[in-house]
Structures are given as C-alpha cells and as structure tokens.
Amino acid sequence: MRTPHLGPVGLCILVLSLLPTTVLGQDADAWRTHFAAGEEARQAGDAEAYADAMAAAAEVMPPGMLNRPFVQYHAARGAAMAGRDEEAVAFLAQAWEEDIEALMISFAPYDPAFETIADSEGFQEVMGRAADMELEVRSLAEGVYRIGGAGSNVVAVVDGADALVVDTGYGPALPALRRALASVGASDITRVVVTHPHEDHMGATPTLGRGAIVMAHPGTGAVMSEPYVFMEGVELPLKPLAAHPAVAITSDTTFAFGQHRVRLVPTVAHTIGDLTVYLPDARVAHFGDTYLAGNPMMFPGSEDPDGFLDRVDGLIAEMHPETVAIGGHDGPTDLAAVREQVTVSRAAMAFTREALADGLTMEQAVERAADRFPAQWVGFFYRLFSEDPG
C-alpha cells in the first residue's frame, strides 16, 4: 500500500499515531481517545462505531485546532458509510464553514465512502461552493501578492498580464484563483512553482500545466507519477503529463521573471520534494510547509534532521533581514518567527537525545519535558533517535 501524502493536518495526525496511548493520555485533549477508537473501528469494518467515535471526536475538539477538518472529514465519511446521509453532509458543511482547511472536503468526490450520497442535492451543493469562493489578495511588494484561501498560500509574481504562481491551491479553487489574479491585472499564468507534492499546493497543476511551465523538485515529479493517496482507500487519479515538472530543480537555481529575481532552493524534509522560493528584490520568501505557523517547531524529516535545520538556518542568514516570510498556511510573518522554530526544534532534539542517553523510556522523557516541549514531538524524536541515535 502506498504511503498517504500528508499535508499539515495529516502530519499532525501521523505524529500522534506514532505514540503509545500512555503518552497521548498525558497530552490534554479528549478528542484523541475518540479518534483512536474511530480508527480501530474503521479498520475493523464497523461503520456505526467509526461514525460514532469520529462524531464524538469532532464534538469535543476545541474550535480552531489545526487537526479539526481532518477529524470532521472522518466524521462525515463514517456517517456516510453508516447510512446517515444528512449527518455526513452536515460534517462536510461544518468543515467548509469553519474554514481551517475548508477545501479538504475536495477529496470527498474521490472517496468510495461517499458513493451512495455523491448525487444528492446536499452533497453537490457543498462540493460546488469552491467555484464561488472569494480569495484574499494582499500586496507584499510591487508586483508580488499573497493570495490566501485556496487551500494553501499562493504567492503571485505579476509582470503585465503574465503571472508566476508559487503553489496553486486545490484544483476546485482554480476559478477563484484566476479571479484573484485578474483583480491585480494578470490574465495568464505562465509559470508555476510547486513547493512540495501535496494536493493543497499542487491541485491545479493538471489544468495549469497545459499552458504554463511547471517547475518543481524531482521528488514532486515522482509523486505525480502515481495516484495521489489522501488516506487509506482514497486516491486521486494519476496526474496527466501536463502537470509534471517541465523544469526539475535539483540545486539552488535563480532566474528572472519580469523585474524580479526568483531563487529556488531545495529544502527537502517535510516531503521528498520541498523547495523554498526567495524573491530577493521583493524581500519575500515562500517556505511552503517547511514553515507552519501553527506548529511549535519545524518538522525536520527523518533522514538528516540536523542537516535540514542547518540548511534552513543558512538560507535565512542569506536573506534580507526585513524579508516577509510566507509559510504554506496562515498569514505573512517575519524571519524571526521562522528562525525561532529552528531554535525550538534544535532544543527539542537535544533534549530528546539527552533523555535517551540517560536511559529514559519514552514516557519518562515526555514527563521530564513537562511544559517545555509537546508530548507528541518528544515522542516523535524519541522514536527517530532510538532507531538512529545520530
């Protein structure tokens, strides 16, 4: 079975899934117990228990949590599998209206769990909302804009009627993205840079790739070469060749687009295809999901976490100190916020290595961490360094 390609929400769930129940129990929120029960029921084929547990998880989860739309999606699919059609549509609508990652519901038409309600009026109405959405457009510098609301942050570099876009958002958001670009005078997307191979960042490339040059890390091209797995049993069709990168970025690369220099730097860790995009003249950097403001620290991957943090640190040091930092999600910030995540990540890694050297179990390491570091991150690093002490 192929590994799901996890976005920020899925990554949080993955980190949690690596931890034993005793560790999760020390990390406050009750929704996790319901979610774990729901996963067990789903794997056992018990649709009613799956629906009930995920509905309970969604009910007790605090508003605004990054994981919430993923839990709501599970609640919707569980309800659909249990024949509770109105409840399924209601959870999808709730995920849309709360707008944490509203367009996650875009996977539902490809999910066999919703097959029995796919033609219903309620399901079709919720699925059709993306076409009419309005995206937020914010000027970052002359000819450079941040467009929010497409499922991920899009940075657009506009040169007359032409635009280069960094990431595309989900496919169903493309009409809204075109309207947002038209509002700043751009009518033609001629270049697309994909920061990493997650659907919320590359969903519109099948359409855009027919008329634009797609640029991405080879790892992104590799992911595009197979069906995209959102979760077990939910696959998007294979992307057409037009979506695949025409230009593979294997090393630090700079080119001109209009009056702006565009620098593409491989920063692989969050996925096998991460790029950071830096516009030195505009003093704008798009870090993709390498930087997620909602996380307390930076996910450094499992291959070379220290090397990854060194690369990010070095790249930040080369940027103008007043650079506007754009993560994959959330609003613009500054380089200090990105650097702080690097610092906290290093500290958490050092703490965990020390705990291992002292012979502590995972549970004891989490207890020692207390309020310093979240249990799920200590648990992740504990597992990682137990296998490879580094």
Image (cartoon, helix red, strand yellow):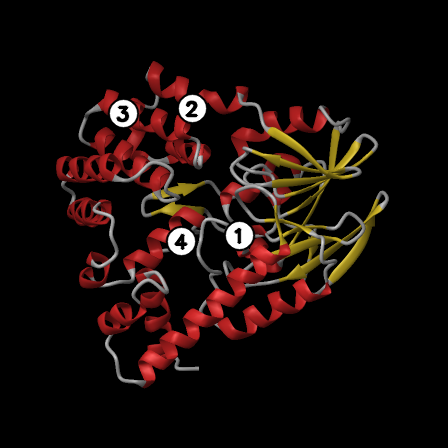
In the image, is residue 16 above or below residue 206?
below
Q: Residues within 10 Å of mark 2 (few under 14, many from 20)?
A: many
Residue in the image at 56% along x and 63% along y: 268
Residue type at numbered disc 2? Met
Q: Secondary structure at mark 4?
A: helix
- The residue that label 2 is drawn on is 127
Q: Nearer the viewer, mark 3 or mark 2?
A: 2
Residue in the image at 36% along x and 37% along y: 69
- The residue that label 1 is drawn on is 289
In the image, is residue 57 above or below residue 355?
above
Q: Residues within 10 Å of mark 3 (few under 14, many from 20)?
A: few
Question: Which mark is first along the chain, 2 or 3?
Answer: 3
Which label is found at residue 11?
4
Q: Secondary structure at mark 2?
A: helix
Which label is found at residue 116?
3
- Quadrant containing the C terminus is bottom left
**Distance between the alpha carbons at the discs numbered 1 and 4:** 11 Å
